[in-house]
Image (tube, rainbow, N blue to C red):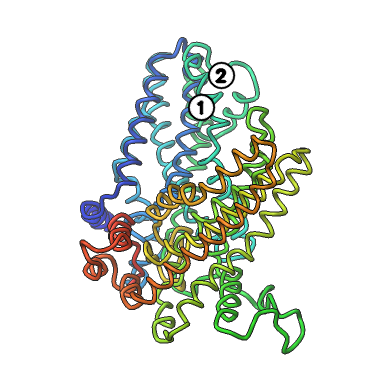
Amino acid sequence: MAGLLIRLKFTLLGHSATGMRLLGIALTALGLGLTWYFALAAGSDDVRADLLGLVFAVWAAAWMLGPTVANGTGVLRSQYFALLPLDRRRLGALLLVTMFFDIGPALTLVALAALAWHAWAVDPAALLVAVPGFLLLWVFVISLSRLVFRALGAAMHSRLGMEIASVQWGLILAGLFFGWMAVQPAFSATLSLSENGLGEGAVGTVLAVLPTSWPVLAVQAAAAGSWGVAAAWLGALALLTGVLAAVTAVLLAPRVGARGVRRRSRPLGARPLTGGAPGFSLLPDTPLGAVVGKELRQWWRDPWRGLELRASLWAALFVGLLTWTGDSFSFLTPFAGVIAAFIMVLATANMYGHDGTAMWLTVVGQDRDSIRADVRGRQVAILLLIVPGSTLMSAAFILATGSHWAWPLVITGMAVFFGVGSGLSLLLSVVALSPGVDPQLRVDANDTGDNQVQVWIAMLALPVLSAPAVLAAVFLGLAGLPWLAVPVGLLNGALAAWWLGRVAYRRLDARLPETFTRIRYGKEIALRTVAKDGSWLDRLERTAIKGNAETRPTGS
């Protein structure tokens, strides 16, 4: 059975090569080269031991975060086998076995084999410990990667788990955008590591506690003649790896049942704008009001939508705290709300992909005004959800840091970014829609679809469309009149929100059946509905269909 699944995996890999996968292989190969560089260039045996403990910890962290960032659900999804008469736990264990058969794990194994070189350098007899040590570490790292990814998906089935997942995603996003501020000093010290090692300090103490350093400690103990200590370190790693693999196999096992947050009562926010009085509503009794209310409930109840919304706020908070702790970049701290607006565009650029095949309700209910109300209502709802938190965040940072000079710049930036962002996210949600797993079948945190094309387009288009307000803030700020940039930002944001929203609802109104086709039947059928030499929107749509990886619902 294991051989059959491995062959099936390689067959699927041969037909699903993506740019993100090739990038991952390239980064893994780079990590392999750096690992062996440190192993060969170390000034002494003790320095090499320090460096290998550090490098192995980095490998574990990369495998923990890499699949989450790169939408690494794996080639063989457990849902594919949910209806087969197979023992679920055994199938979960077999799926874990298939994870080790790929280019990335193979390169990782070669990198971890640097431990054998270290053992040969200190005492050839220590190879008896080094070989099982790096093999156990390899199993530990790959199992940990799958465990973290699946645990993140399993956490989406509770409100507390979703909040924890949002914090994790916020940390990841903050690290991707501004982690270079923390990495830069470490990168500058890289050249001296091969000569001096980590030295005495808290870093070496912390690394020694991590399981990734236990094989190194076992080799050091064996080289010193303490074979009992070496066996204890290996035994502890073997026990931990076995427990980790067993838990991972359980999480990888397919499940059949309702997905989402399980509730025994009506959730908070079920009537978010009713004012608590029967028959009273703060929303107008119009199609626009209906869409706003529906979207507010969806963003509150749906764990996958809530993850993206909350992750934007958490990421902005972590960026604000990160810049606050550093003197060189503390001037960015008051702009945490602006950063939240920027990340919001990236997180909400696939709203119709979140709907899944429920878009059929929009298709059958289409009339003269319904599509415009649907697009405008989504714009209003997302602003109602994220603007208050972002505003309070920036205000708190300004007051805490005493950076009152930033008030007009922050207001200008938030006005233009939220305006442009609300329109741009809806336009990309329509034109560059990326279908994911249907909501009732979602398991993993990345099941809402691959939106890498939308992210790159948004990162380029948002600064361009916001350029008038940004330039006004810069030049008027230099002239000592920063408050005059505020109306420019409001006007820029309002015009962009109106125009981009108009383009979005006109496009959706004209191609609603084709948009649903892309969700229901996948990219091969969707490509046939888009003109090859059409308008710029047609070219953008074809680029998104070809560029985004396809995640199909089970059985579709």
Residue at 40% of width from left, 86% of height from top? 364
Residue 282: image quadrant is: bottom right
Q: Residues within 10 Å of mark 1 (few under 14, many from 20)?
A: many
Instruction: Specify the label residue 198 is tagged with.
Output: 2
Residue at 59% of width from left, 23% of height from top? 204
Instruction: Specify the label residue 433 is tagged with.
Output: none
13 lies left or right of 300: left
Q: CA distance from mark 1 to mark 2?
A: 9 Å
The disc labelled 1 sits on which kind of residue?
Leu
- Local secondary structure at mark 2: loop
The disc labelled 2 sits on which kind of residue?
Leu
Residue on which disc 1 sits:
54
Q: Position of residue 88 (x, y in %)?
A: 40, 65
Q: Most extreme residue toward the bottom, as rendered?
A: 279
Q: Position of residue 355 (x, y in %)?
A: 45, 72
Residue 7: image quadrant is: bottom left
Q: Position of residue 311 (x, y in %)?
A: 58, 54
Can residue 147 be seen here? The reply is no
Q: Are marks 1 and 2 in contact (CB under 8 Å)?
A: yes
Can residue 5 be seen here? The reply is yes
Q: Position of residue 390 (x, y in %)?
A: 66, 54
Residue 158: image quadrant is: bottom right
Q: Quadrant of the N terminus?
A: bottom left
| Total number of numbered discs in the rendering | 2
